[in-house]
Image (tube, helix red, strand yellow):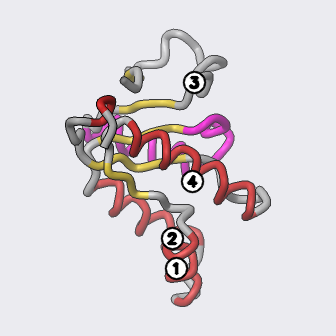
């Protein structure tokens, strides 16, 4: 453990666009985010983890069932980390709304909220 991550900060859920994007690209983006969050002291739930994705495929779930399972995992976390492009994803919007409604702290990848209106009632925290 590095000096940067000497204190565990809880469990972080990664939220980012997945549908319609090459699976390898999605896995890599989420894997990179997970590595950054681990470095900062977080335990991470990665919904783009190949093992989690394979488990969901085995059950032949539809989109709403998968989203419900992801939201259930988010409910077990202490914070959410939004990746760029979240605002173009129905799933990310649902996850963000759930986090906001439940007062789950919201963190974001640099630039992820740059084009969002300033009067948006969602408080985004800086990842330290």
How far apart in space, not on screen, are marks 2 and 3 (Cα)?
27 Å
The residue furthest left is 7
Which of discs 4 and 1 lies nearer the camera? The answer is 4
SS majority, magenta: helix
Name the side, left or right, on which 55 lies relative to 77: right
Which of discs 1 and 3 lies nearer the camera? The answer is 3
The residue furthest top is 118
**Which residue matches tag 3?**
110
How far apart in space, not on screen, are marks 4 and 3 (Cα)?
16 Å
N-term-proximal mark, 4 vs 3: 4
Quick one: quadrant of the N terminus? top left
Element type at marker 1?
A: helix
The magenta segment = 83-102
**Which residue matches tag 2?**
66
Write the residue at 59% across / 69% down. 63
Element type at marker 4?
A: helix
Q: Specify the label residue 56 is tagged with.
A: 1
Instruction: Tell me whether circle 2 and circle 1 mark residues in contact (CB < 8 Å).
Output: yes
């Amino acid at each position: 453990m590095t000096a940067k991550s000497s204190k565990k900060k809880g469990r972080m859920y990664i939220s980012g666009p997945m549908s319609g994007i090459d699976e390898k690209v999605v896995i890599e983006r989420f894997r990179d985010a997970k590595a950054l969050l681990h470095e900062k002291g977080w335990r991470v739930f990665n919904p783009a983890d190949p093992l989690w994705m394979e488990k969901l495929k085995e059950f032949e779930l539809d989109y709403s069932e998968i989203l419900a399972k992801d939201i259930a995992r988010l409910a077990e976390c202490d914070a959410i980390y939004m990746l760029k492009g979240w605002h173009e994803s129905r799933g990310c919007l649902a996850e963000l709304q759930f986090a906001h409604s439940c007062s789950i702290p919201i963190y974001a990848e640099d630039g992820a909220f740059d084009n969002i209106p300033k009067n948006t009632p969602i408080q985004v925290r800086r990842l330290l």
